[in-house]
Amino acid sequence: MDFDSFLNQAWDEHATDAAGVAQRLAASGPSLVTDEAQIAPLGNLVHHVYGEHLGRWAEGLALLHRLAKHPACSPGGAARAALARYQVSLALCEGSADERAAMSASDRIRVTALAAANLAERDTPRASALFAEALAEADRAGLDATDPANRALAVTANNLACTLEEKTRRSPAERALMITAARAARRFWALAGTWLETERAEYRLAMTWLQAGDPALARHHAQQCLAIVQANGSVPLERFFASEALALAEAADGNAAGRAAAVAQAREAFAALDEADQSWCRASLDKLAG
């Protein structure tokens, strides 16, 4: 198996078999690397699996150190810098070291947000404190809109909100972190993304407020999502999910007429999808119609 196939398969399977993917990463990942451009993507997956999914900080650090010593990883290169961020993040989670002081403001923000995401389900108070720290430093740093920390915060915030939305039960602290993360994703995607990422951040906010038990705010953000889609060509796939969010919000608020109208919009958007997109959106449509 070549590197790209290995990495793609690992991403496909990591959510359902994190331990198995971790084992394969350690056994085969470094040996498949043939180019420096492959180092950072592999390090990203190592950090994500050993950090967020497994909480096996020391093992993840050991594998990242192996990657840093790989012949393809040049000193002073972008790949080595990425590995350093992942290493500092895992060490921070483990509590074995805090090496952020020596980093640039941009890198500190990214590392702190990464560590918060890793800890969200294991130590919510600490995750909340770290994420608040990352947001506060971003405010103080006055970074340019093109700084990679903005995109890193957007991605991490979105993932944090998604992770907490999927929990069947949330503590008050987890609910608060979920809302803070969804709001931050919207803020930073507006800086780092296009209209597409911004409207998807509105979708995320709608789903977050549904899980938080506030259908009125969920409706507001679903409507904002739909408005952005309509202002940018009404792409069928985006219109479908915006309508889905609106239908769910109306249903949660007991508005049968609003729900029916939103479901009709979702059906119309679904009909405009190509066959490939219909195949994976059909379950969502069926759930709405049920």
Image: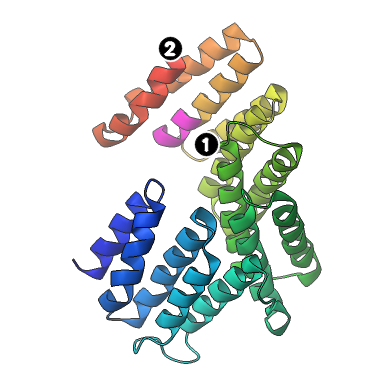
Residue of label 1: 229
Q: Looking at the picture, does residue 230 appear above or below residue 26?
A: above
Name the residue at 58% across, 36% down: 167
In this picture, which residue range is highlighted in magenta? 236-241
76 sits left or right of 37 in the view: right
Q: What color scheme is it?
A: rainbow
Residue 102 in sight in this render: yes
Classify mark 2: helix, strand or loop. loop
Question: Magenta stretch containing residue 237, yes or no?
Answer: yes
Picture coordinates of residue 122, whole percent (x, y):
63, 51
User: If the image is split into quadrants, where does the N terminus sit?
Assistant: bottom left
Q: Quadrant of residue 45?
A: bottom left
Question: Magenta stretch containing residue 200, yes or no?
Answer: no
Q: Quadrant of residue 149?
A: bottom right
Q: Quadrant of residue 170?
A: top right
- Type of amino acid under label 1: Val
149 sits left or right of 260 in the view: right
Name the residue at 43% across, 19% down: 287
Residue of label 2: 290
- Type of amino acid under label 2: Gly
Q: Main secondary structure of the magenta part?
A: helix
Name the residue at 63% across, 56% down: 119
Residue sitting nearer the eye, 241 or 104: 104
Residue sitting at the far top: 257
Name the residue at 52% across, 33% down: 230
Residue 267 in sight in this render: no
Picture coordinates of residue 19, whole percent (x, y):
39, 55
User: If the image is split into quadrants, where does the C terminus sit?
Assistant: top left
Picture coordinates of residue 186, whole percent (x, y):
65, 47
Mark 1 to mark 2 CA distance (whole Å)? 25 Å
Mark 1: give few (<14), some (14-19) or many (20+) Cα within 10 Å. Answer: many
